[in-house]
Amino acid sequence: TAHEEVKTVQAQMRQKKAEEAKNFGQKIADAAIAQIGIGQDCTMLVTNSLKAVGISFHGAPAAYASLGDWTSDPQPGDVIVYSGHVAVYIGNGRAIHGGWNGGTTAEWSVECSNPLVGYIRVRRP
């Protein structure tokens, strides 16, 4: 019936939207991973990661919260905001942090010495 066709198309559209969101976040995560070993602070790591998806932004760690919405279900590409620090979530409790071990970008646990404020799901531009 026409009603079933509409429901099928709506389900396909929801699936496509979910895939696009996942790909968007994964591009941010992949851009962060590509920076491992580069000497930079945490804000430049996140700024450079966001450039991969067309977002031009640089600011203090807390300012990155303005780029999306808080989430309690972190996904790859979410920005992790800490007190005085910012990182990119890559999945499985892991993150890419800038300014680590003498200023290099490194993969580490989401747990760090700075208190966690929360996770930001970045809005598409």
Image (spheres, rainbow, N blue to C red):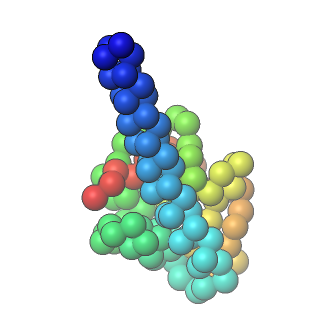
On screen, 5 above or below 56?
above
Vertical side of 100 occupied by 81: above or below: above
Q: Residue at x 69, y 67 (%)?
A: 107
The residue lying at 47 percent from left, 70 percent from top is: 49
Looking at the picture, does residue 112 appear above or below residue 48?
above
Q: Which of 70 and 13 is in front in this view?
A: 13
Instruction: Residue 114: give x, y in percent of width and height.
Output: 59, 55
Camera-side residue: 98 or 114? 98
Q: In which quarter of the image is residue 48?
A: bottom left
Regarding residue 83, the answer to whether it shows in the image is no
Front in this rendered view, residue 14 or 41: 14
Whether residue 93 is visible to the viewer of this picture, yes or no, is yes
Q: Position of residue 36 (x, y in %)?
A: 65, 78
Which is nearer the eye, 84 or 94? 94
Q: In screen coordinates, is 66 left or right of 85?
A: left
Please provide percent x and percent y for residue 60.
37, 66
Residue at the bottom extreme, as displayed? 39
Question: Residue 26 at x, y = what percent?
Answer: 54, 58
Q: Is residue 69 left or right of residue 43?
A: left
- Splitting the image into 4 quarters, where does residue 10 fall? top left
